[in-house]
Amino acid sequence: WVKENSFKPTQSLTALPGYSSAKVPISSLEEKEIFSNLKVLIVDDDPSILKIMSAMLKMIGCKIITASDGQEGLEKALQTLPSLIISDLLMPKMDGCQLFERLKEFPETFAIPFVCLTSRGQEDEKLAAFEKGVEDYWVKPFVISELSMKTKKILLREIEKYQHLFASVNNTSTLNQNVDLAGNLATTPLPQLLRMIEYMGKTGVLVLQEGNQQGKLLFQQGRIYDATYKTYQGEKAAIALLPWTNGTFSFFSQPLVTIQTIFTSLEELFNKLTQYYQVQQLLEQLPPKESYLIFSREFNQALASSPFPSTIDLLIPLFNGNHTLGQCLEKLSENIEVLELVINLYQHQLLVIRK
């Protein structure tokens, strides 16, 4: 797990015995069916490695996502929620070690198995990686047959986790024969639970409970169909529930009689949750939402002499001293681009707190 500072040699994959040009035997139709709902993210800055690894995974039957550096890998992991991440260690922008650490910061990605790709195979580095919690450590050059077998083992283990969760119904199931699953979010993270429901194609209601707070996520054949939480319904309720890390859950298999309100995929919902996190980080740079912000004299002078983004036209009628910052942000729907402009104006004292 030591940083790779040495020159990265040309990487190659060792051909399989008995197969020219490193060709891989095609997986059985049964295997392809088993893995067809699983996604694997490959992160490597070498296009040839991405191409060969993608070909291998395509033959297994799973869906493939690729990224050329750690930053792109993080974004795609949060957007697509893969069942496995295979990442090179030495990459631009964000290396594999940094990517692994960042993935652990998000509840939706911290439990995803992570495999290291590297051209260095020192035992101390392997040991350090395993101590950090990586799933496996693959040293280049590769033997394709070994990679295929190792990948299948990891994916089968993920499938077994899903099946085990649904099989291990606890005593709460005796209260209602329709309870498929019940447990604790502290031991079964919600993102893992949602991926499992999606993979199993379940229809029913997932009830989340923490103290006197309760939320519901409704599923139709594995897809989130509707959600309720407090006064929220639909997508807003789902996004409010996704960050839950404590409390209990119960899944009830039953036909749905409500109207569908959510038409976005689970990946898109988690992507919107990521945007929500970004908004919260940006809001920390602004005064309390109860504050009243107005444009300063310096802004009026700058507006007359300097070009501003067209979005400034959205802000001028809002920040007139009659609306709180919270009311302004609500009208702007907390748009990240506009929010960044508000922060920029505030930091340059072009937007100031009304005295």
Image: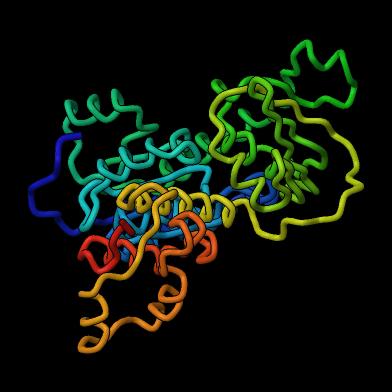
Q: Position of residue 233 (x, y in %)?
A: 73, 49
Which quadrant would residue 7 be assigned to in this image?
A: bottom left
Which of the image's four quarters has the C terminus?
bottom left
Which of the image's four quarters has the N terminus?
top left
> Do we see residue 17 in this rendering?
no
**Which residue of the protein is positioned furthest toward the front in this rendering?**
355
> Do we see residue 112 in this rendering?
yes
Q: Is residue 108 left or right of residue 282?
A: right
Above/below status of 163 relative to 171: below
Q: Is residue 7 left or right of residue 267?
A: left
Q: Position of residue 337 (x, y in %)?
A: 39, 68
Q: Position of residue 15 (x, y in %)?
A: 35, 53
Above/below status of 160 relative to 170: below
What colour scheme was applied to this rendering of the protein? rainbow
Number of dots carrying numbers: 0
**Viewer-nearest residue: 100 or 308:** 308
Residue at x 74% of width, y 37% of height: 216
Q: Is residue 126 left or right of residue 66?
A: left
Above/below status of 90 relative to 168: below
**Viewer-nearest residue: 336 or 28:** 336
Residue at x 87% of width, y 15% of height: 175
Residue at x 30% of width, y 51% of height: 285
